[in-house]
Amino acid sequence: MASRPDCLFCKLVAEGEHVRADDGFVAVADINPKAPVHLLVLPERHVDTFRDVAEFPPEEAKRMLDFVAETAREVGLEDYQVVVNVGRGAGQTVFHLHWHILGGGRPFE
Ligand code: 5GP
Ligand code: ZN
């Protein structure tokens, strides 16, 4: 799917400040961090939710996972959480697929 004009995270992809961008993915700092380091990794193309990952070509799914891991490594995290909220009932509020990277201390209580 291409960029959607009504999607907050499509706008972030196009105009936001990126911690990292490569290979069809971007990482941004979460606007309301829930940990000392809280990044979001997004595919540049619009994908609603993690449910759609089944439709990804295997090579793209692998690149996305590599991008998440490489982003954490580049910002100096060794121990961290990777969280994906899938669907409103699980806390997903923005319907453009994103992976939370949370780390940098003991933020998880
Ligand atoms: P969700 O609840 O959908 O899993 O996560 C959405 C995340 O996006 C939340 O952690 C929220 O703080 C973050 N967020 C919402 N609006 C913006 C924004 O405009 N910019 C950035 N960088 N993060 C945002
Ligand atoms: Zn989008």
Image (tube, rainbow, N blue to C red):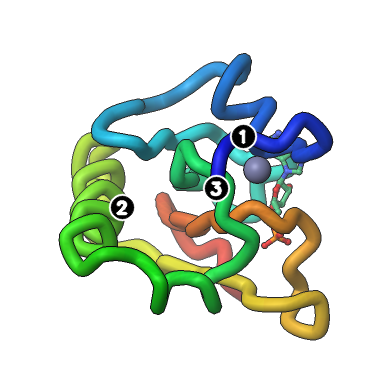
Relative to 68, residue 56 above or below: below
- Cα–Cα span, label 2 and label 3: 21 Å
**Within 10 angstroms of label 3, few (less than 14), some, or many (20 or more) residues?**
few
Q: Secondary structure at mark 3?
A: loop
Q: Nearer the viewer, residue 34 or 66?
A: 66
Position in image of residue 17 (x %, y %): 54, 17
Residue under label 2: 68
Q: In the image as oriented, which residue stretches furthest toward the bottom?
A: 89
Q: Which residue is mark 3?
A: 1
Q: Which residue is mark 1?
A: 3
Q: Residue at x 47, y 22 (%)?
A: 18
Q: Toward the viewer: 104 or 62? A: 62
Q: Amino acid at mark 2?
A: Val
Tell me, yes or no, if residue 101 can be seen here.
yes
Quarter of the rendered structure image containing ligand 2: top right
Q: Is residue 16 above or below residue 83?
A: above
- Amino acid type, mark 1: Ser
Residue at 56% x, 38% y is 2
For image coordinates 80% across by 61% down, the residue present is: 93
Looking at the image, residue 65 lies above or below residue 28: below
**Left or right of 39: which side holds 57?**
left
Q: Quadrant of residue 109?
A: bottom right
| Residue depicted at x 43% and y 71% | 53
Question: Where in the figure is residue 36, as x and y percent of width and height?
Answer: 53, 45
Helix, strand or loop status at disc 2: helix
Q: Is mark 3 within 8 Å of ligand 2?
A: yes
- Say whether mark 1 is within 8 Å of ligand 2: yes
Task: Work out whether 11 lies above or below 106.
Answer: above
- Give the left or right position of residue 89, taking residue 83 as reference: right
- Which of 101 and 97 lies nearest the eye of the viewer? 97
